[in-house]
Amino acid sequence: MGLQWSREEERRPLLAGSRAPRVFGRRWLVLLLFSLLGFMQGLVWNSWGPIQNSARAAYGFQGLDIALLVLWGPIGFLPCFLFMWLMDTRGLRVTVLLTLLCMVLGAGLRCIPVSDLALRRRLIHGGQLLNGFAGPTAMNAAPFLSTTWFSPDERATATAIASMLNYLGGACAFLIGPLIVPAPNNTSGSHLTEGHVESIKDRIEAVMYTEFGVIALLFAAVVAYFPARPPIPPSVAAAGRRLSYRSSVWRLLSNVRFLMIVFAYAIPLGFYAGWSGVLDLILTPIHINQVDAGWIGFWSIVGGCFVGIAVGRFADSVRGVLKPILVLLFSASTLSATWFTLTFLSRVTHLPLTTATIYTSCILIGVFLNGTVPIFFEMFVETVYPVPEGITCGFVTFLSNIFTGLLLVFLTFYHIAPSWSNWSLTGSCILGLVLIICFRESSDKLSHPKYTI
């Protein structure tokens, strides 16, 4: 359906004699504060993977500890539906305040100065878990925020910005950690001097104190101003009644089209999150150091953020192109993942195994996969409207984090070779592409009677 149709229909009065939908300039401040929340949650979640060698030297972390520090993110999704119920019933303000409270407590817990390294490690693990509890809001609330505050021709763009900033935070962890924290890559672990270890520990603590300060300031800003909703809804869809939770769950589980795109999203994006979280571990056998691995992770996610925002803006301008965009992006990500995986078999495939080829293939995987996120979110809420946006996206990201956790569990507890995660990622991209091709796109949300009155 064309852009002109959506603008005219959306801006009709909600009811006879009532005021027409309108948007407010403060929506951009709300979007900024929420995006910063997502950015900091992603940054804290990915703090340890890019500097795992430094963390081992400074705090005595083992491989299991590093994997658990990444795994606390998916584990933090266990109360996901509680946060989504709170958002759908109490609004954004209460949910965002509770989310930021978890983040402040988690970041503060990591900063408690204790000399006992065993206790310090437990405090860091506890802080990461609390930050993981903030994940459901940071990753799921973008469509709810965009529907609540933005007009139809801005909604995909707002969803893209709000969702991509969480990924950008994870990307900046690849950059900030290795650039600030010195790596012991060129020093044998048995010959590390006490001064070198203390230098590493001081830099890590400086990063943690800074992250705590920024999150505390953000919490204060949200306490000062973050409305639950605008005085007047921006569209008919924003004012429409949603289904009850029992009806919503039944609608989600019985909608085959929805389940197709759920698995097309959850499996590849879940595996990619786990794969990128241990990217340093995967690249270590081919002698890619901590700094290079950090730059690879950074540019792969940053590129995906730019692509995601660009395609979100394009989707706002041209209706009915969500599926073609996903097919294009998934085709490119499948080819890139296949290239990266076969490069590890250079003795068989004779593909050049160089820093340049690793950089290029890794970055392209992240660019194309991360670029699909806002398009998927828009497709989810359109396919099952009037199911509340919170429960819809919560269900999807909960499944995605299950697959992230499964990959990390196999790598950690079953000692599966890291190279097998490359094959898992490639296979998941192929499966996602097949499911998207078989999916029949239709804008249920746009054609629903409540939306077009």
Image (tube, rainbow, N blue to C red):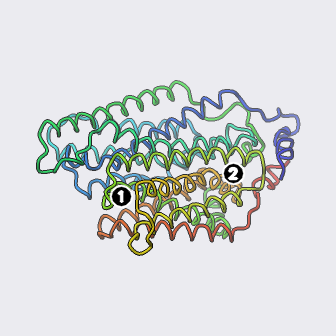
For discs 1 and 2, the disc positioned in front in the rendered view: 1
- Residue 173 seen in render: yes
Q: Is residue 14 left or right of residue 96?
A: right
Contact, CB < 8 Å: mark 1 with mark 2? no
Label 1, secondary structure: give it. helix
Task: Name the residue at 34% across, 65% down.
Answer: 411
Q: Is residue 388 left or right of residue 413?
A: right
Q: In the image, what residue type sits under mark 1?
A: Leu
Q: Which residue is mark 1?
A: 283
Q: Report x, y in % for residue 286.
A: 33, 60
What numbered label is drawn on residue 196? none
Q: Residue at x 65, y 55 (%)?
A: 244
- Residue 229 vs residue 304, the one in the foreground: 304
**Front in this rendered view, residue 125 or 408:** 408
* Label 1 to label 2: alpha-carbon separation: 47 Å
Q: Residue at x 59, y 65 (%)?
A: 264
Q: Nearer the viewer, residue 185 or 249?
A: 185
Q: Which residue is mark 2?
A: 242
Q: Position of residue 18 (x, y in %)?
A: 84, 34
**Which amino acid, mark 2?**
Arg
Count residues near mark 2 (Cα–Cα under 10 Å), then give few for <14, some for 14-19, many for 20+.
some
Q: Is residue 202 left or right of residue 209?
A: left
- Most extreme residue toward the bottom is 348
Q: Residues within 10 Å of mark 1 (few under 14, many from 20)?
A: some
| Image location (x, y in percent) of residue 117 | 16, 44
Pointer 1 or 2: first along the chain:
2
